[in-house]
Image: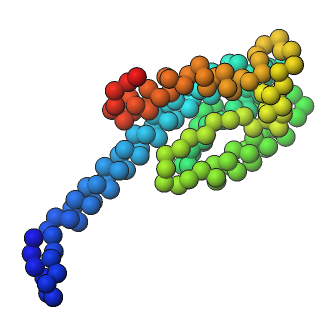
Amino acid sequence: MAIGRGGAIRVKGVDAALKSLKKDVGRVRSAALAGLITGGMRMLGASQEYAPRDLSNLRASGFIIWKEKTGGKQANFKGDDASEMAQEHSNFVNREKARLPALMPEVEIGFSANYALIVHEDLDAQHNIGQAKYMEAGIAKEQNNAINDVRAAMGLALI
């Protein structure tokens, strides 16, 4: 410490400590995001497995996004309206990405097909493959594994 003009006290090393702290916060944020991406991909994959399929367009409309990027496989739509669905998917994902906070590590998974919510909520529909509440089922199945993905990425003990 040193006493400056007018009786002010100047603490040496504060700038270096703040710089180091900012680096640490950045590393924690990056590690948390890496774990969230891994866990999100895990939950999305499980949700896609539970999703009803005819042409597999609902399944193909699954996405994972975070502020910097969109992840996962390229949507591969089939049928007469494939190009329209691809454009709607791109627009939907870009709108959702714009809503994510810049500073907090956050990942969003979902399905862009305009009928995704209806299929998800229709408990009376009969599906040869898949089920209603497909997203909830996928998330529930992989929730603990996704939490462990975040904990592992951050170097914390697994549950």
Q: Which residue appears farthest toward the front when viewing the image?
A: 7
The one of 139 and 34 positioned closer to us in this rendering: 139
Q: Note whether residue 78 is visible.
A: no
The residue at 36%/35% (across/down) is 154
Q: Residue 28's quadrant in the figure?
A: top left
Image quadrant for the N terminus? bottom left
Q: Residue 129's quadrant in the figure?
A: top right
Residue 135, placed above or below residue 34: above
The residue at 32%/56% (across/down) is 22
Image spot of residue 120 (x, y percent): 78, 27
Image quadrant for the C terminus? top left
Q: Note whether residue 94 is visible.
A: yes
The one of 68 and 135 positioned closer to us in this rendering: 135
Q: Is residue 121 left or right of residue 140?
A: right
Q: Which residue appears farthest toward the top when viewing the image?
A: 128
Q: In this view, does 64 lie to the left or right of 145?
A: right
